[in-house]
Image (spheres, grey):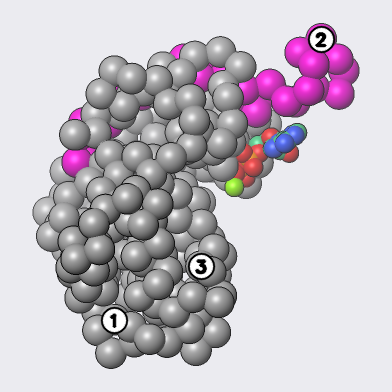
Amino acid sequence: MGRLAVNGVSKIYGESDASSSVVALRDVTFEVPDNHFCSILGHSGCGKTTLLNIAAGFERATTGAVMVDGVSIDLPGWRNTMIFQDYALFPWMNVFQNIVFGLEMKEVARKEREDITRHYIGLVGLEAFETKFPHQLSGGMRQRVAIARALAVQPQLLLMDEPFAALDAQNRSFMQDELVRIWQREPKTVLLVTHSIDEAIKLSDCIAVMTSRPGSVKEFVRVDLPRPRDEDDAPYIALKRKLRELIRDDFVSR
Ligand SMILES: Nc1ncnc2c1ncn2[C@@H]1O[C@H](COP(=O)(O)OP(=O)(O)O)[C@@H](O)[C@H]1O
Ligand SMILES: [Mg+2]
């Protein structure tokens, strides 16, 4: 299960009464049903990474909490797995070893963890690359390893911080399609950070549109378009216009 609730989350860096303190998030509240895909959309510096780090247990909220199935996330762990922009693979481990690692940490029995690892290698389409090392792989393939590694431990919440930012436009679009395919095969509650309107529309069931700093939710938008989504469809274009206006208004008024 993985019903996500972001409950009144604020984050102040530094002493709250010091002039140097930064209010990164202010009263962020929204809910994501189990196995839904939610994007956080906003300009650079609006607190997206901060929110994800709190959801991963890397940082503590100053007030409020991120909860999964009613339980507050206070510590990092395999239940809330983060996929980083730079993939964060172990360079001295091959594809198989990178993916099986989390299962070893979880103390899954040998045969089972090997079966699970092969399943996820197959799911992300890397059967022929099991024994390759990260430096022998393209950016898109590294990102596949990172996705397989994250899914293999069966997290309740999958967190991604601009996961495709390091890829060129064509690969990014391809990996977005791949992520949708993988997520449809194995649904999961996902929280993905992006500053790309198209990425948010293409992937998400819901989009939390953030205001500029201090970040709060300007509008929580549901996306009911059938997948795969076609950027030439009228409803897609209308939604894109709406999101662009929400974000542009914010730029003008800050
Ligand atoms: N560890 C930190 N200490 C102080 N300020 C921080 C820290 N991390 C982030 N910030 C500030 O909080 C704000 C939000 O940052 P961040 O969450 O990285 O935004 P985004 O990911 O949307 O670009 C920024 O103004 C940033 O400078
Ligand atoms: Mg960021």
Using the image as rendered, state which of residue 65 and residue 75 is in the foreground.
75
Stretch of the chain drawn in magenta: 8-36
**Coordinates of residue 87 in the picture (x, y in percent):** 50, 65
Q: Which residue is mark 1?
A: 126
- Would residue 165 be visible to someone looking at this image? no
**Badge 1, how many Cα within 10 Å: few under 14, some, many 20+?**
some
Q: Which residue does the numbered mark 2 point to in the structure image?
A: 17
Mark 3 sits on what residue? 89
Q: Nearer the viewer, mark 2 or mark 3?
A: 3
Which residue is at 51% across, 67% downward?
89
Residue visible at 45% across and 49% down in the picture: 82
- Kindly indicate whether the residue at mark 2 contacts the one at mark 1 (C-beta within 8 angstroms): no
Residue 239: x percent and y percent? Answer: 30, 46
Camera-nearest residue between 85 and 150: 150
Quadrant location of the C terminus in the rendered image: top right
The image quarter containing residue 226 is bottom left
Compute the Cα span from label 1 to label 2: 52 Å
The type of residue carrying mark 3 is Leu
* Residue 59 shown in magenta: no
The picture places residue 148, in percent across and down from the top left corner, at: 32, 65
| Amino acid carrying mark 2 in the image | Asp
Q: Nearer the viewer, residue 156 or 221?
A: 156
Compared to residue 191, the image places residue 121 above or below, namely below
Amino acid at the residue labelled 1 = Leu
Marked residue nearer the N-terminal end (2 or 3): 2
